[in-house]
Amino acid sequence: MHKNSPVVKKLLKCARLFFVRSRLVLFMLKKLLLTFILFPTAAIAQSYVVYDFTHDRVLESRSPNMVQPIASVTKLMTANVFLENNKNANCTQSITEDDTDYIKGTSTKLPRYTPMSCNELLKAMLVHSDNYAAHALSRSAGMSRMQFIQKMNEKARELGMTSTRFSDSSGLSSANVSSVMDLVKLAKYLLGKPQIQALSNTSATYVRAGRHNVFVKNTNKLVREEMFAAAINKTGYIRESGYNLVFVNKKQCHNNTIGVISLNNASSAYRSSFTKSKLEQYGCPALNDHELYASADDALYEEGYDEAGFDQLIQRVAN
């Protein structure tokens, strides 16, 4: 059979695609194994803290100093470092091929190579947890991506977050780790950041990208369905971390500001119900009487793996 025949070409393409997919799967398996070795408890245990920010005290906790991957909770620090270091009020940036997620294969709703206001990227990152927006912001504050990540780690040390390490700006890497008590320190600091607070409590919005208006909803069901108002709010999920949430209630609870921070919840539904129950237990009533039940929005707007995006990534690498 001639090497240029359609059949041979098709076989070669299939073999190449299989090779690329196998290498990517092997890479992911190695990362997962490394996570089990470095963080054996992270795969089996939830850690959480219910914190009174008014009186600076722990109300309830489990394994509060356990170090675990935090996934997209990372984006709270990304937002803070960007806001504190960006000197250009009219900052714009485009999402490029450099912002592609080669770790998990997630996609983005935002158009590529379209100049966008950095404030719009910030909105996409904090409300919809867009990974590409996080990557673009990390090179938008007058420094390289690596310098930006260094600033994130420096800020963590400045805040006394001794168990926290960042290796990327999106949280896709399982090497981004922290503890719930470290995240209390971050949340406390961010209560002084009005822009982060406003976006934390945004249930749905449009992100303007050139001629496009991209509709996004909050990844936290409690905010998306306006069950609670948030002062600070960020979800996170990768397979290695489980379902994470930093949530500080905006309204006073018996004259106290109460937060619930949890890592490695078993599911998104459990994360929501657990947070709701703890808030109500400590005097933070829900704003409406909606029942927590699965809806189409959960799959559309919450963090998870985009299998189609992963397949498209493999196709791009293969070709």
Image (cartoon, rainbow, N blue to C red):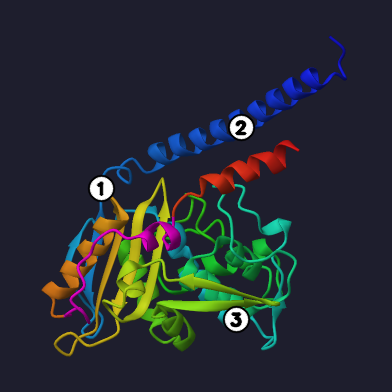
Task: Indicate whether 72 appears above or below 199.
Answer: above
> Residue 150, image x and y in percent?
59, 64
Q: Which residue is drawn at 66% across and 59% down?
A: 99
Q: Residue at x 64, y 26 (%)?
A: 18
Q: Is mark 3 on a helix, strand or loop?
A: helix
Q: Is residue 309 left or right of residue 4?
A: left
Q: Is residue 287 magenta?
A: yes
Q: Quadrant of the C terminus?
A: top right
> Residue 128, image x and y in percent?
48, 68
The alpha-carbon separation of the residues under discs 2 and 3 comes to: 36 Å
Q: Quadrant of the N terminus?
A: top right
Q: What stretch is highlighted in magenta?
A: 284-303
Q: Can residue 152 be seen in this view?
A: yes
Which amino acid type is marked by label 2?
Answer: Arg
Mark 2 or mark 3, earlier in chain? 2
Q: Report which residue position mark 1 lands on.
A: 45
